Image (cartoon, rainbow, N blue to C red):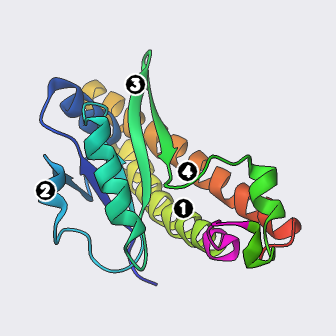
Amino acid sequence: MSRLSLLVLWPPSQEREEFLAAVGADGMEVVDSPGALEGRQGEGWGILLLGPTLSPEEILGVLWRERSKATPWATFLVRREGEEWRLWPLAFGPSLGLEALANTAGAPEEAGPLPDVNWILRGLGKIAHDTNNALTAGLTEVQLLLMEADDPDRTNSLQLIERQFRRLRALAGDLSRIRAYGKASGGS
């Protein structure tokens, strides 16, 4: 199974540094501008996190580019709400409720320009599975380091990383539940 890539697109700022410190930047590639994305994203699955300081035009440009790829990456907008960092999923296409989207599985092409729901469900399942595997491995390493931590600052930092891993793992679980709902509604 290929490794899930994680790329952060966010112009340099204090807020970006706070985010990277909060989630731990290990394994993340960070780029400063949409132009710097060219050639950075390899083949296969990945997650692209967009910083909140990007303009709407820059975000739309990234989404258009992702739409044209054979394997688009899951794209999220990062925003802080109070003390918590939140990931808002971004998609290119019409806004549909989950039930409406799941009900289009197997619909004839005359139904309109909808994405292939089965492809989306398979992609969500793969992203959830690969993300959960990576997060579980990282969480295990953090927990092992916590058992050996003897410095209060190091312990606090590791506990923060552990909380962020658990939050991201909960998001991966949400993707799995969406896929399960789609499968129960007729998707593959």
Residue name at image x 79 percent, y 65 percent: 104
Closest to the camera, between mark 2 and mark 1, is: 2
* CA gap, disc 3 and disc 2: 25 Å
Residue name at image x 44 percent, y 15 percent: 82
Residue 187 quadrant: bottom right
* CA gap, disc 3 and disc 1: 23 Å
Q: Is residue 83 left or right of residue 185?
A: left
Q: Is residue 4 left or right of residue 9?
A: right
Q: Which residue is mark 1?
A: 132
* Residue type beneath disc 3: Arg
* Residue type beneath disc 4: Arg
Instruction: Give the answer, above or below, for where 108 lies relative to 37.
Output: below
**Callouts 4 and 3 close, C-beta under 8 Å:** no
**Callouts 1 and 4 close, C-beta under 8 Å:** yes
- Answer whether residue 150 is visible to the viewer in this image: no
Closest to the camera, between mark 4 and mark 3, is: 3
Q: Earlier in the sequence, mark 3 or mark 2?
A: 2
* Residue type beneath disc 1: Asn
Q: Which residue is mark 3?
A: 80
Give the x, y percent position of residue 152: 30, 25
The residue furthest front is 110
**Callouts 3 and 1 close, C-beta under 8 Å:** no
Q: Which residue is mark 2?
A: 35
Give the x, y percent position of residue 174: 66, 50
Give the x, y percent position of residue 178: 72, 56
Q: What element does badge 2 sit on? A: helix
Instruction: Give the answer, above or below, for where 33 lies relative to 67.
Output: above
Q: Which portion, as a residue range, is magenta? A: 112-121
Q: Which residue is mark 4?
A: 169
Residue 28 quadrant: bottom left
* Magenta stretch contains residue 181: no
